[in-house]
Amino acid sequence: MSLDTIEILVRLAWLVGAAMFVLGLMRMNSPATARNGNLVSAVGMAIAVGATAVLLLGRQSLGGADTPAGNGIVSWAIILVGIAIGGGLGLYTARSVKMTAMPQLVSLFNAVGGGAAALIGIDDYLRFATAGEAVPLVTTVAVVLDVIIGSITFTGSLIASGKLQGLIAGKPILIPGGRIVTIALAAITVMGALFLFAGNVSPLILLLIIVAALVFGVTMVLPIGGADMPVVISLLNAFTGTAVAMAGFVISNDVLIIAGALVGASGAILTKLMADAMNRSVLNIMVGGFGGADDTAGGAVAGGGSVRSIGADDVAIQLAYAQHVIVVPGYGLAVAQAQHAVRELAELLEARGVDVKYAIHPVAGRMPGHMNVLLAEANVPYPQLKEMDDINPEFDRADVALVVGANDVTNPAARRPGSPVSGMPILDVDHARSIVVIKRSMGRGYAGIDNELYTNEKTGMLFADAKEGLAALTAAVKAL
């Protein structure tokens, strides 16, 4: 078989892989097909990687450019060891990570993707520089954009992961002279890029750009509060895709360009949707977040009003004899790993003829789709998971709204001006006939304000850890 034939077959395989990426992305649009969509995309990537390996083997055996440098056996050993280490770590972390830590893992994957893309651009540029060749402008532009976006993604994602993991404070961390530092970093990057675009070949200037971009990634994410991390994760995911697409232009690899463009575009769209769900612009979020969580306990919320505490037995009676119950899961449910407990309670109520649905807010949890994935892990039926726009009209006829660990996304203060959450779309929990909130304390949410829902005369507060509170409710319902 000739090298030309191999290249044609490989490009056809890349096209198949790219088509599977698109199909997989389409199927990820629904919780019911998301798992299958992920599998389809993974198979597409396996085809693309396998085809690339065949192309390298063909070029080594039949001659051609772009073969691994150095001794063939050593080069392939390095490639295989890299695949084994990377694939092994990916498999281990994906299988062992807790659902509550999934956002941190996504951030780490973003960092790896951005860093890898930047290294591709660096390697290609150094290949030209060490050979004493002039770097084509199209290559220089792609390399510079690749290393800038990839480097920002790398450090920014690491900071975001640290904030989510608690290794770095979730509240906004302001850097002294932060604006001056940001302007200086941007000036260094732009001036360095223009210098290289002018046809100058300088690995030192490229290194300066990389360092400035790495520092910028840190200064960009540190001042953002924990409340905005879901949007930041989505934005950094878009950055990763864009960096990968730029890397594809650098090495003229169609499948990298397509895959990166898909990730970049979908990440950008998701970022806009998430920002809209918080009624904020992406620029406003990047300037700074609401602030960190506040777990201060108390018995009443600011602005007056009393809080009514309620016991598990009283709640169980309400739930057992209701016709329609809507469960509102939040990050508190995720932290307590109470997804199986809430499913057990729901199944018990359904056995008594109660209609149970779950209200999913777009920014519930710490990443897009967090609640959907968490409840799917507990085998909650997909039809019961209702998005905000679909479930809000049903609160008016709900006998009980059971809020488990959700805070800001249920705050009626969002409906009037003058509040930090003003205009943010919320779940209309206060429209239900009765409201039960399972919460450990009267601590505030990420927005740093009190939830007016807690002083509503229809609201009863069951103070407990989400998992323990749900277990107590299940036992009480069984005892009726």
Image (cartoon, rainbow, N blue to C red):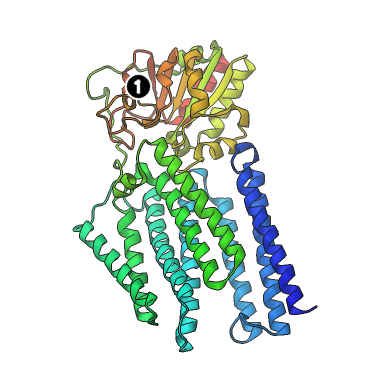
Q: Residue 289 versus residue 335: which sits nearer the camera? A: 289
Q: Residue shown at 64%/57% (left/top)? A: 18
Residue 429's place in the image compared with 457, above or below, is below
Judge left or right: residue 461 versus residue 390: left
Residue 150's place in the image compared with 208, above or below, is above
Residue projecting furthest to the right: 1
Q: In which quarter of the image is residue 137?
A: bottom left
Q: How many labels does the image show?
A: 1
Q: Residue shown at 57%/65% (left/top)? A: 86
Work out which quarter of the rendered image holds the N terminus and state it: bottom right
Crowd rating for badge 1 (residues with CA inside 10 Å; few <14, some 14–19, many 20+)? many
| Residue under pointer 1 | 453
Work out which quarter of the rendered image holds the C terminus and state it: top right
Q: In which quarter of the image is residue 374?
A: top right
Residue projecting furthest to the left: 177
Q: Residue 474 versus residue 129: which sits nearer the camera? A: 129
Q: Where is residue 110 in the image (x, y as percent from the top left)?
A: 48, 57
Q: Where is residue 143 in the image (x, y as percent from the top left)?
A: 45, 71
Judge left or right: residue 182 versus residue 439: left
Amino acid of disc 1: Leu
Q: Residue shown at 67%/53% (left/top)? A: 20
Assign a secondary structure to mark 1: helix
Judge left or right: residue 166 versus residue 475: left
Q: Position of residue 215 (x, y in %)?
A: 32, 64
Q: Position of residue 362 (x, y in %)?
A: 46, 36
Residue 37's place in the image compared with 67, above or below, is above
Question: Is residue 21 visible from the viewing direction of this image?
Answer: yes
Judge left or right: residue 64 versus residue 155: right
